[in-house]
Amino acid sequence: MPDLRNSTPAPVLPINADEAILVRGVRVNNLKNIDVDIPHNQLVVLSGVSGSGKSSLAFDTLFAEGQRRYLESLSTYTRQFLDQLERPDVDTISGLPPTISIDQKTGSVRPRSTLATTTQIYDYLRLLYARAGQAHCPQCGVAVSRQTSQQIVDRILELEERRKVMILAPMVRGRKGQHRGVFEKISREGFVRARVNSEVIDAADPPELSRGKTHHIEAVVDRIIIKEGIRPRLQESVDLALSHGQGACLVSFRDGETWHDRLYSERFVCVECGESFAELEPRTFSFNSPYGACPECEGLGKVQADDADGKTSGDIDEQQVCKECNGSRLNPFARSVTFGGVRLHELTALSVAEASVVIGRIQKELHANAEYGSLTPEGRLAAERTLPEIASRLGFLEKVGLEYLSLDRTTQTLSGGEFQRARLAAGLGSGLTGVCYILDEPTVGLHARDSERLILVLEELREQGSSLIVVEHDEELMRRADYLIDIGPGAGTDGGEVVAAGTPDEVAAQADSATARFLRDGSPVATEDRRAIDHEHALSIYGARLHNLRDVDVEIPLGALVCVTGVSGSGKSSLFTQTLVPALKLAVAGKPISGPFERLEGVENFTRIVEIDQKPIGRSGRSNAATYTGLWNEIRKLYARTRDARLRGYKARRFSFNAREGRCDHCKGTGADRIEMQFLPDLFVTCPVCKGDRFNRQTLSIRFAGMNLADVLRLKVSDALQRFENVPKLHSLLQTLDDVGLGYLELGQSSLTLSGGEAQRIKLAGELTLTAHTPTLVLLDEPTTGLHPVETARLIATLQRLVEQGSSVVVIEHQLDVIAAADWVIDMGPEGGAGGGQLVAAGTPEEIAAITEGHTGTALRRHLARDDKIPPTKTTSPTS
């Protein structure tokens, strides 16, 4: 591996001061007082090895300053927190447009957030169905019609005689506020009593309502007892209630000690069964509102297994789906509304590509038929305005390669790359101009075929008048950039400088950095001698059929590095992480094997199944790479053995963030305070007591090699390697973290701030540190996330090391260097969604590259062509 520290910085090309973001004297994290000019309205890529300072410049400087300036424009309530926000350590930033960060954090933790809500498609759909939809009775399916006051009186008189009844005029239905003006209006119009949240009160002396809670307020029009001759009075009261209740009348009748409410309306009623319904509104279709949500699952679409049917079942998915709404999240009335012959929940259950076809069909029918579906003028206008917005956003989702996802897919289940591209599509749909988008590796999780489509989207954003700053390692995106800024030359203290800036060709010609050499010479990964594949000892799955899988049969060779490829949505994760791994875990645990497949063979070859995913390594700010890998335990023992610690009686426990006697009492060992911003993301500010050191003064007085624990936590892994080179066990653990490309990482960096790729590589390091090795299947999903091509070479060597230790390693990956270095490749596809779910081919990388079918073979053939390793072209797959 080349020595990055000896790279010679090239001269930075100047830019016209009126056409750029001018940044002077940046000293954030490892940035070394750098000056950099970033041109407006261009696609600018920040390159460099991991830890070189790219994110420090893009997110910790430019976005942080943009966010700070935005907060300054908000209310006094928000601005009171600004004195606690640290300004980026920079002399000046001029020409900075409003900034929008689209990073790799894996979406909302809320189960209510979906792809449709994230991209605002659902907002337009709710408006469309509220204004142009046709309601039906959930019981009998008959179209709902309006109800006259005479019909309402007839329904009330069906109650038995002597029944006590209140006639109410709805004034406020489920709205927040104190509503003083409403009570004044009720008294002014001659009503003596009102009902507030089901309690009758004196309208002239209303209670003080909580501003932040929702309330129901009605004027009490009349209180009667059902008896003969009451019709004239009842008719007058109902007419008065409808007049003041905007066409609605609420009837409350007593049954024993309980009052029951019935809402009648001049607008919607079923003519067959007489059931009344509220006016259609956008909130009728909101699963976040009690007016639209399924009452059983409260709008989540799923319930706990015991709540669903009270017993366990082999099919976990069926156990979790709410049986009341069948996973649609909506109540029966909302599910009954149709537009264009389609119900809203049916439309959102479709994939992006399928929904786009349906919306296109409805648009054509609407334009061809002046009386389409008996639409009112208001309904037609709503359809003509919302349908193009919906179609446009669906088109953007297709452009960023997400056409295979369903609109009701929860953001919890999206990968970091998928969620980032969804937000990118939302940015395209917003039509914003003059803003600066800051993106973190948008090509993560994309096949080479899909990367090209994403680049076209970024170029479209640029053409709309926006600036784009992209932190990226992808070769094609770097070459297509308008302007490339290479940060480095190394990581941590060896980085933080502008190595070169200019067009990609200019950077390649000027500099001698890892990026420049990559642009000039291509990949640094050498194809290793491949292991012989033993087909007698393999793990085989037959008839896999989850999601889009079409009875797939696959053989996974043992004792080899196996790479699973295919375009997004082709079925890779469905086959391996959602079908194979759960079944193997059951087998290893000695439980009956079950799942969406016919049979599984070869499970007896494993005693451990390790899934190294990109989920966070901890749930609190106290967890970090050192605690996860066991490194911190060794450091605590080391400090407990020092002379001062022994004299004071300090045990290893005292040096834990969780130990009350050793940690800072104010921040409880996190080093930061959380500030809840309500309508904005929470802010984290440095603890004012320990200044981010996490421990109290007594604990920090213990030193080893001149360092206290706070000093150790601030060390980069690469620096710690040198400081602890004479502590064998510590040095070995640190070396493993460095081997997986985390040399730049601070030992104490909170797990909450780690990217998915960093969390995954920490887990990989933890697996490598095991001293006892048993037959293990290790599955990794896109482990090259966040890695420069130079670091990818080191990761491949680490994966090969795992295989040499006796593990079978399966990697789901799009990165061509990893595919080329694998012993065996399994290619899924040929397309995503309904066009995928098949085994395209399986074989060595050279065999896959020789196949004309499939997108992977095409991309791999170009990649291997540099080394003249392409065998004669085949037209059929090496495996059937």
Image: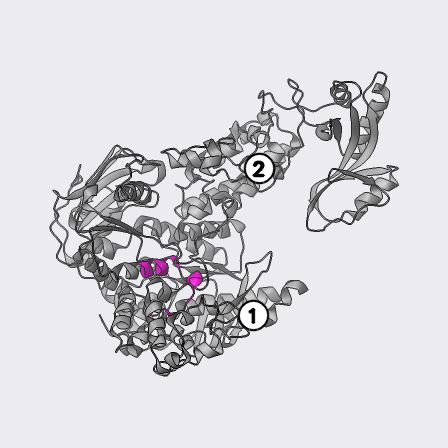
Work out whether 689 lies above or below 762: below
Quadrant position of the N terminus in the picture = bottom left
Q: Percent position (x, y) of residue 849?
A: 19, 48
User: Is residue 778 something that shows in the picture?
Assistant: yes
The CA span between labels 1 and 2 is: 39 Å
Q: Circle 2: is it few (<14), some (14-19), or many (20+) Cα within 10 Å?
A: many
- Structure colour scheme: one colour
Q: Quadrant of residue 34?
A: bottom left
Camera-side residue: 365 or 197?
A: 197
Camera-side residue: 213 or 277?
A: 213
Q: Quadrant of residue 84?
A: bottom right
Does residue 290 show up magenta in the picture?
no
Q: Quadrant of residue 728?
A: bottom left
> According to the image, label 2 marks what residue?
293
**Region rendered in magenta:** 744-763
Residue at the spot 42% in from the left edge and 44% down from the top edge? 398
In the rendered view, does 473 fall on the left or right side of 798?
A: right
Q: Percent position (x, y) of residue 741?
A: 30, 65
Q: Percent position (x, y) of residue 848?
A: 19, 46
